């Protein structure tokens, strides 16, 4: 597995990471045993970057990772990122208050069973606090030895610059894939300029960029996706038509669609780190193949011809799902 630097000053991590939101029933029922087997597979594949958050199952995802580490006697082969800022409290859904974040950090450390978090993100901005204040709070965690590097999820390029002026921002997490290319309107470029890694979640477009796109009946049973505009009609059928073209191209190139989608993303820039989140080891293997796939200029042009920028029908979030992410274009 190729390595890339996480932020300007390291550490080196696998170019392909793993997103552990699926350990908490987000995309269907999960078992702790199955999640631990997925972590075993990550280790076997050479994946060293694991991403989670305190809100995933209200601590469940972090606990699974912590229990996996405990079974290894505390030996930690992973660079672990986790997040704070989404509370699950309907009265105060987002909270960047320093006291709240400090208490949440201690709870995450306890669940994970580690002395320090490798990368600690603010999951969503709480507009009661200026970005500089939040960056100062995160920097304080580094100075206290509880955090090694800091980041933000779903922020605007302008906010990134302001935060980075206070303390180096190692990574920004954003949805980025062949189906969601909004980061190319400034965030992608700003990250490259500042030496900030762009950690790309949903790199296979919530299965729209795989050989197994979700059916309407499957989507109906998934509480988050069944309210997402891209997975509701008429958008779903239109998007599945593009999926078919992409699958045909991938087959013609001799690879799985997911492998091709991951390879395209990795070729976008040296600061890109995709974090797919499948619990299926065979599907994870496809992502690993993509991480090692070399694409030519001609290959990239063929992909862009089949999935031109802006092809996806429907917004990536519903109005309710847009609470928290910063829009900048």
Image (cartoon, rainbow, N blue to C red):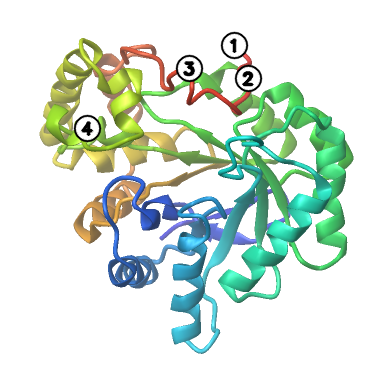
Q: Earlier in the sequence, mark 3 or mark 2?
A: 2
For discs 4 and 2, the disc positioned in front in the rendered view: 4
Q: Which residue is mark 4?
A: 219
Which residue is at the far bottom? Answer: 73
Q: Which mark is residue 184?
A: none
Dot 4 or dot 3, earlier in sequence: 4
Element type where label 3 sits in the image = loop
Label 2 packing within 10 angstroms: few (<14), some (14-19), many (20+) = some
Marks 1 & 3, CB-CB < 8 Å contact: no
N-terminal-most mark, 2 or 1: 2
Marks 4 and 3 close (CB-CB < 8 Å): no
* Sequence-first disc among 1 and 4: 4
Residue 319 circle label? 3
Q: Is residue 265 above or below residue 243?
A: below
Q: Nearer the viewer, mark 1 or mark 3?
A: 3
Instruction: From the image, tell me which residue sits under label 1.
Output: 329
User: Does the image show residue 19?
Assistant: no
Above or below, 161 relative to 111: above
The answer for how far apart the CA atoms under marks 2 and 1 are is 9 Å
Label 3 neighbour load within 10 Å: few <14, some 14-19, many 20+: few
Residues at circles 2 and 1 in contact by the CB criterion of under 8 Å? yes
């Amino acid at each position: 597995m190729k390595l890339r630097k996480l932020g300007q000053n390291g550490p080196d991590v696998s170019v392909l990471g793993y997103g552990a939101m699926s350990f908490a029933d987000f995309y269907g029922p999960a078992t702790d045993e199955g999640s631990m087997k997925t972590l075993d597979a990550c280790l076997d594949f050479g994946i060293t970057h694991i991403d989670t958050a305190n809100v995933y199952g209200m601590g469940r995802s972090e606990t699974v990772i912590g229990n996996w580490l405990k079974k290894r006697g505390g030996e930690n082969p992973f660079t672990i990122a986790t997040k704070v800022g989404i509370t699950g409290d309907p009265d105060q859904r987002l909270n960047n208050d320093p006291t709240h974040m400090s208490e949440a950090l201690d709870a995450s450390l306890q669940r994970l069973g580690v002395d320090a978090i490798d990368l600690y993100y603010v999951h969503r901005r709480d507009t009661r606090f200026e970005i500089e204040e939040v960056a100062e709070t995160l920097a304080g965690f580094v100075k206290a030895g509880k955090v090694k590097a800091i980041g933000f999820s779903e922020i605007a390029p302008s906010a990134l610059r302001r935060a980075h002026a206070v303390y180096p921002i190692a990574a920004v997490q954003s949805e980025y894939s062949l189906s969601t290319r909004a980061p190319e309107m400034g965030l992608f470029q700003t990250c490259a300029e500042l030496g900030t890694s762009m950690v790309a979640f949903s790199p296979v477009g919530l299965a729209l960029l795989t050989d197994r796109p979700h059916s309407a009946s499957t989507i109906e049973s998934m509480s988050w996706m069944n309210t997402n505009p891209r997975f509701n009609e008429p958008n779903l059928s239109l998007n599945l038509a593009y999926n078919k073209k992409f699958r045909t191209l991938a087959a013609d190139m001799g690879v799985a669609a997911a492998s091709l989608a991951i390879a395209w993303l990795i070729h976008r820039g040296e600061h890109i780190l995709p974090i797919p989140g499948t619990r299926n080891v065979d599907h994870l293997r496809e992502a690993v193949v993509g991480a090692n796939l070399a694409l030519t200029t001609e290959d990239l042009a063929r992909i862009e011809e089949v999935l031109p920028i802006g092809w996806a029908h429907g917004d990536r979030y519903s109005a309710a799902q847009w609470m928290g992410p910063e829009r900048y274009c």
